[in-house]
Image (tube, grey):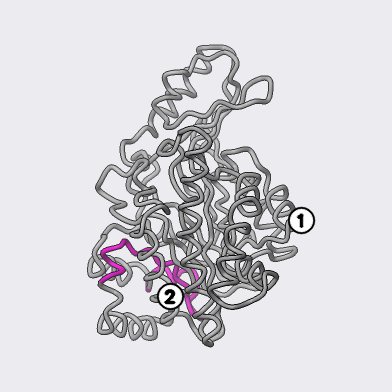
Amino acid sequence: MKTTVGHLSYCTNIHPGEKWGDHFEQLKKYIPAVKQQVSPDRPFGIGLRLANSASLELSKEEQLTAFKQWLKEVDAYVFTMNGFPYGGFHDVVVKGDVHAPDWTTGDRVAYTIRLFRILAALLPEGMEGSISTNPLSYKYWCNRCDEEKNAFVESATLNMLLVVEQLAKIHRSNGPLMHLDIEPEPDGIMENTSEFISWYFETLLPLGIPFIADKLQVTETEAADIIKRHIQLCYDVCHFALVYESPKQVIDTMAQHGLKIGKLQISAALKAGLPTEMDKRKEIVDAFRKFNEPVYLHQVIARKTDGTFIHYPDLPEALEDAENPVVNEWRSHFHVPVFLESFGVLSSTQEDIKQVLALQSQQPFTQHMEAETYTWEVLPPALKQEMGSSISRELNWIKEHL
C-alpha cells in the first residue's frame, strides 16, 4: 500500500509453493484477507517472490494476463520482487543453497532478467520497481587465495552488469525505472555497508563504466550514473543488526557515498546477552537451542568482551561454543515476528526497526518497504499463529511506527 513515505508490503516468500499455480493459490488465499485488515480502502502492494520454475510459467502471456486481471479485481499491485532464493524455499533443506546458483552463473543472470521483464509488465504506470538479490555468492564457496577470490568476484560482477544493460535499455525505451538491490547478509560475499561500498567503488564501477559506456554508447559519467540508478542496496534490517551496524550508520554512510537504498526489508533477528554465570548462561543457550531448526541458515555473530566478533556459520556451531568465556552477546539470523520485542529470556533486534522507521518517517531514503518474516513455518510451536493474522499484525505494527 502507498503510505506517506513510500510503498509498504510483505514478501510472499513466506508462502509455500515453487510452481506458479501453487503460489498463485496462496496469494488468492491470503492477499484479500490481509488487504481487508491493513488497506481496505486503498490498493494493496505485493512483494512478489517467484522461484525459477514459477517465473518460467508466469512469463507465458496467458498466465501473466490472468494474474494482471486478478490484481485488478482485488485492487492490488506488484512493486517489488524477491530474487534472492532461486529454487526451493519451503519443505526442503535450504541452508547455504539459498545462494545457488550464484552470480558467476548464467542461470542467475537469466532468472533475474526474466523477473525484471515480469515486473515491468506488472508495474503500475509511473512507478519504479525493485528486485532484491543475493550478495554475489556464499563466502564459503570462494574461500580461496586472494587472486582466485578476486577473479570470482569479477566474474560475478560482470554477469550482474548484463542485467544493468537490460534495465538501462528498458528504461531508455520508455519502460519503467527498475533497480537490482544487493542484499548483504552474514557470510555472503558482502556482509555489511563497508563491504558493499568497497565492492561498488573498487569492482563494480571500474568494470561497469567501460562496459556500459561501450554497450550503450554513452560517456563514462553517464555510464556511472546508469549503474548507480540500476544497482542499489537492499537494506535488510535484520542482517545489518546482526553485524552490529546501527540504522543511522547505514543510511548516513550510503548517502555520504552518493549511493541509493532501493529497498528496505523490515525484519528482526534474535539476540541475547550471555552472562558469565554459567547457570544463567545455560538458560539463554537452551532458549536459543529451541530455534535450532534444519531448514534455513541461522548464522550467529558473537560479540566478545574486547569488542571484536566471532562469526559462526550456523547456530549449531555457536551452541558448541556456548561456554566461551570471552563472549558476552549472541545475535542469530532467525527472522522473528517484528511486533514482538522479547521471547522469554531472548530478545529481538526490534529496536533497530523502530529506529529505521523513525528515520524513514523523518526523511524518506527509499520508496520500497517490505516486511520479510519468512520463518513462520519453522518457528517454535509457542510462537506459531495463523499466518494471515500474523502478516496483518506485522504490517499494522509497521504502519503505526511510520
Magenta run includes residue 138: no
Q: Amino acid at mark 1?
A: Gln
Location of residue 67 in the rendering, given as x and y in whole percent from the top left corner: 32, 80
Q: Indicate the quadrant containing the C terminus: top left, top right, bottom left or bottom right.
A: bottom right
Disc 1 and disc 2: Cα gap in Å?
30 Å
Left or right of residue 50, residue 136 in this image:
right
Are discs 1 and 2 less than 8 Å apart at CB?
Answer: no
Disc 2 packing (10 Å; few <14; some 14–19; many ≥20): many
Per the image, label 2 sits on a secondary structure element best described as helix
Left or right of residue 358, residue 34 in this image:
left
Residue 383 versus residue 326: which sits nearer the camera?
Answer: 326
Per the image, label 1 sits on a secondary structure element best described as helix
If you read the primary sequence from the N terminus, does the residue marked by circle 1 or circle 2 appear first?
2
Query: Splitting the image into 4 quarters, where does residue 390 fall?
Result: bottom left
Left or right of residue 275, residue 391 in this image:
left
The residue located at (33%, 40%) in the rendering is 381
Decide: is 72 above or below 141: below
The residue located at (75%, 63%) in the rendering is 362
Location of residue 112 in the rendering, given as x and y in whole percent from the top left corner: 40, 65
Q: In the rendered structure, find residue 111 and report the number of the disc placed on it.
A: none
The span picked out in magenta is 32-56
Magenta run includes residue 38: yes
Q: Amino acid at mark 2?
A: Leu
Decide: is 86 above or below 219: above
Disc 1 packing (10 Å; few <14; some 14–19; many ≥20): few
Location of residue 192 in the rendering, given as x and y in whole percent from the top left corner: 60, 44
Decide: is 146 above or below 216: above
| Residue identified by numbered label 1 | 256
Left or right of residue 402, residue 216 in this image:
left
| Residue identified by numbered label 2 | 119
